[in-house]
Amino acid sequence: MTRIHIRRDQSAGTISRYIYGNFSEHLGHCIYGGIFVGKDSDIPNVNGIRTDVVEAMKAIHMPVLRWPGGCFADEYHWRDGIGPQEQRRNMVNTNWGGVTEDNSFGTHEFMELCSQVGCEPYITGNVGSGTAQEMSEWVEYLNSDGDSTVVRERRANGRQDSWGVKYWGVGNESWGCGGIMRPEYYADVYRRYQNFCRKYGDNKLYKIACGPNGADTNWTDVVMKNAAFCMDGLSLHFYTVPGSWEHKNKATEFTKDDYIETLAIASRMDQLVTDHAAIMDKYDPDKRVGLIVDEWGTWFEVEPGTNPGFLYQQNTMRDAMVAAVTLDIFNRHCDRVYMANIAQTVNVLQAIILTEDGKMVLTPTYYVFDLYQHHMDAKELACEVEAATLGTEKFRVAGVTASASEKDGFVTVTLSNLDPEKADEVVISLPGAGEVTGRILQGKMDAYNDFGNSPLKTEAFSDFETRGDEIIVRMPACSVAELRVKI
Ligand code: AHR
């Protein structure tokens, strides 16, 4: 049995909607094929962008989308992706699969995608191989309504008014694929580049500095010490890689031990956020600078027969549990975590959507985002979980994860039973609990949705009862539920 205590008088603050963000890179079939098929495609599209994928993104109210990379961002020259399609420069995508990038999806196409989805754009500028002038002019192209050659160029390319992009990344993984920099050097480079990313009209950019790789607290310390004064956000990248980078797990064939190892690794996000937040507190006690976890998710072996550089992997209930564990952590740390972007939206790593030509599959991870929607912009409520643990000393994880929030007369509780074999009775104490409705996602730990056979989806859930201030929930093995409690 598990006990959960929800306290309506204790809160870490508001859960930013941007925690439910996504990341889409020019990598494999994320953009090309997955999102963008071109106007002449037989696949239903609006201005070249797949209608089925846009509808799926809209249904979960995706709040923000990060683009164009990733490692790709530091080799991307935005001018290659504007103007007449036939005149766009071709390049080889050296990071991802060595394929030709024809730049048919560029700035205008990305902004069109965000407009169709109704999400905020988050653009990462090129620091590694681009100049400060190039970055500065991209911001001007996007955001200025002044009379300049750059703005006239945008207008000649069909866009009269500025778009007003707010979220701006200054380089990606500058400690790695973005230039193998030391934090001391990057902090100075960041200061210089961000300086030329101007404010146009009322649109003050939210500037995001490259943050640490996983547990690298020294990076956070040095960059915060030297550049916190001119940043709004600091990124953090952390991937769940069970096994090792050389011998990664397969996405769909794994043991119970692999499953628990995976969830134990994903749970490390809690300590990472705690550790980096403590350093940020030193330089930014008012918590003005947001922690932006702009790459997170599982990283498994690619599916057999696919290009290793395309990072295409299936997505099982194990991925769904990773998403639940991670999103609960972000909710609980909403006093510092302002945005997060799962890697990646379509056909890459822990994708929420998979496509194959004209077909589309929504993954178990997608349905977790569906179940968590009501947390967006809600007041976080302290949610203490007393649960048995799973696993052994090496890889141990709490058997139940949960988070809670309040908004518009409802408390939303998301709870997951991580045990892959046993159901659990969960007793939730919530003073003032009224009528409860529920939805659930459940399946075997290695179950997944495939083209032509998609058994997993969110369903109505009612296996609970209310007794006074307690809700007693019977959670099936390997399940994620949302309860909406009238308050
Ligand atoms: O998401 C795939 C890659 O992982 C990104 O391009 C890079 O930033 C990270 O290493």
Image (spheres, grey):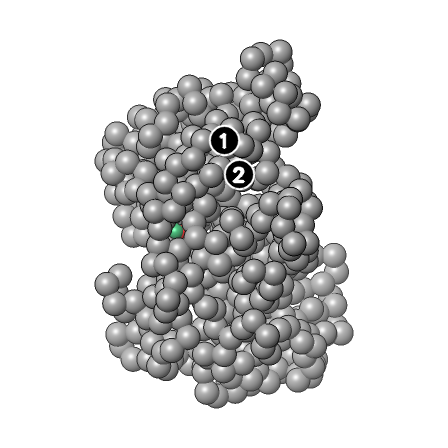
Name the quadrant containing residue 282.
top left
Q: Earlier in the sequence, mark 2 or mark 1?
A: 1
Q: Kindly report the distance in space between the C-alpha atoms of the residues bearing marks 2 and 1.
A: 7 Å
For the residue pair 93 and 392, the one nearer the viewer reads as 93
**Crowding near the residue tagged with mark 1, few <14, some 14–19, many ≥20 C-alpha atoms within 10 Å:** some
Judge whether 367 appears above or below 77 on screen: below
Query: Can you say which quadrant of the picture contains the C terminus?
Result: bottom right
For the residue pair 268 and 426, the one nearer the viewer reads as 268
What residue appears at the point 43 percent right and 23 percent down from the top-left corner?
Answer: 134
Q: Secondary structure at mark 2?
A: loop
Q: Is residue 319 visible?
A: no
**Crowding near the residue tagged with mark 2, few <14, some 14–19, many ≥20 C-alpha atoms within 10 Å:** many
Residue on which disc 1 sits: 88
Q: Tag 1: residue type? A: Arg
Name the quadrant containing residue 446.
bottom left
- Residue 366, how many percent across, how many down? 57, 64
Please state if 386 lies on the left or on the right of 243 as rendered. Answer: right
Disc 2 to disc 1: CB gap under 8 Å: yes
Judge whether 111 appears above or below 142 on screen: below
Q: Tag 2: residue type? A: Ser
